[in-house]
Image (tube, rainbow, N blue to C red):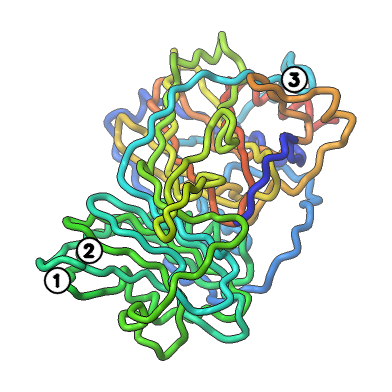
Amino acid sequence: MKFSMKKALVLACIGCSLISTAYARVHGDEHNNTTVAVQTIPDKSVGAEKNSRELKPDSSNETVDLAVNMKVDGIHPKYSNRVPESWHPVDTINWQPGPQSSPQPLKRWPVKVFDNGGTLLFSDSPEYVEENGILYSDVVEGNGRVFYYHLNNTSQSKKIAVVLENQGKYTAVVHVSRQALSQPSDDYLLVGKTSQQQFMDSQENRDIFIFGGKRKLLDNVMNTTIVRPGQLVNGIYDFHADMPVRVSVIMYSPGEDPLSFVDAAKVLPKDEHRLRGTYRGMNRVIRAVREYDPLQDGAVFIPLADNQRDVYRKGIDATDGSITENYGNYGIMYELHIPVKGSTDVQYLLNPQGGVYAGAMTVRDDRQNQKFLLSVPASRLFFGDKKIDDYTSSRFPATENTDYIYYNSELEDLGVYSGKMRISFEFSPPGASNLPVNFILMPATQAMGLAYKWQTR
């Protein structure tokens, strides 16, 4: 699992990602009583193996339109951006320079943070697994989520699975509501991104019945999935257990019975990063303290997963009782609610701060209860691989309540939406990606001005 706390902007051409050549506008009052249909996309499986990618900067200076159903390099087209065109009708615009200077200052938007939901079991230590055994285990009752991220660091093929054990006398029912299981791969960014896309797009509805004293797999596919040497696998599952159930993440050899394997398996020691544990409250809700007024407030940002203004969760490693910290908040699902005052169109952006980033988000119209998937970034597997020059970095240092967008900042376009709509976003730190990130809002006209000004540099 990668993470970075460097407070430096990671950069690329804003013209490639800030705004499309056609201004995507949304007017919420036109769609209040309209059902929006998602375009049907054929479902084809992602390849089981993929060569590791060398992280090279994108040298293209081409302006990219808002991606709707775009085929993304290395990503299944089912999980490319699918906000329907009725949310983004394309209007021709007259590009005019705005009054902004470079860099564009951002002020931190005040928010309240609430943690809720059930229990998160986070299993990422040892990340590089060198022998068979139990990677993490604890008992869950009620709502739960298991997030595991492990690499087979042996010379032989292995399997990684989650075993559920009912230690009581009566039949337990485990209801799975959301799930993702990546294809094993040595392309770690691909694994982290596709598993997050699958999870955010998932709507499961299945029950697992476990008799007293018996065990079952959380997902039978796990026992048919081969993890070859050097390959990584990432699984995310939301479930509800109607009575206490022991959840164990294991690595074992093909040909072994995973349910019997648990009897004699030992708990493997954690590595130096200690990224495993049980955390109460698997969701985080971020709500603005007051309405955002685009015309009065200008460009603002909300920092995510920086452990200063958005702190990491602390929990317990149930295998030894020690206190642990989820350094990165992996497996935590965020809801971002920022009400907008008036009807002005607002541009939403995501800016990686710590390095290479590949993930997914969802955008929801809370009035119509419609949700759509966003690949982040949409036009390629990852972004955040650009570097800022030392002079600019030292001249405009970020502070607790201020930050900046530079003319070559890497920014992912999350869409332009009317203030009349009630928009919220879902976010979660993706496996293999670096943190923190800035979630940015600004008036759409201001974003157009920046795009025009900096595309012509």
- Which residue shows up at 51% across the image and 70% down it? 46
Q: Amino acid at mark 1?
A: Gly
Q: Is residue 161 left or right of residue 393?
A: left
- Which residue shows up at 54% across the image and 56% down it? 193
Could you tell me which secondary element the residue under label 2 belongs to?
strand
Note whether residue 365 is visible: yes
Residue with the mark numbered 1: 212
Q: Which one is in front in this view, the residue at disc 2 or the one at disc 3?
A: 2
Could you tell me which secondary element the residue under label 1 belongs to?
loop
Image quadrant in which you'd find residue 297: top right
Q: Residue furthest front?
A: 321
398 to 355, vertically: above or below: above
Q: Position of residue 407 (x, y in %)?
A: 78, 30
Nearest the eye: 446 or 159:
159
Residue with the mark numbered 3: 97
Q: Amino acid at mark 3?
A: Pro
Q: Position of residue 305 (x, y in %)?
A: 56, 38
Q: Is residue 403 left or right of residue 270?
A: right
235 to 454, vertically: above or below: below
Q: Is residue 72 left or right of residue 196?
A: right
Q: Earlier in the sequence, mark 1 or mark 3?
A: 3
- Which residue shows up at 45% across the image and 50% down it? 331
Q: Give the Cα separation between the discs numbered 1 and 3.
A: 69 Å
Residue with the mark numbered 2: 206
Crowding near the residue tagged with mark 2, few <14, some 14–19, many ≥20 C-alpha atoms within 10 Å: few
Q: Give the Cα separation between the discs numbered 2 and 3.
A: 54 Å
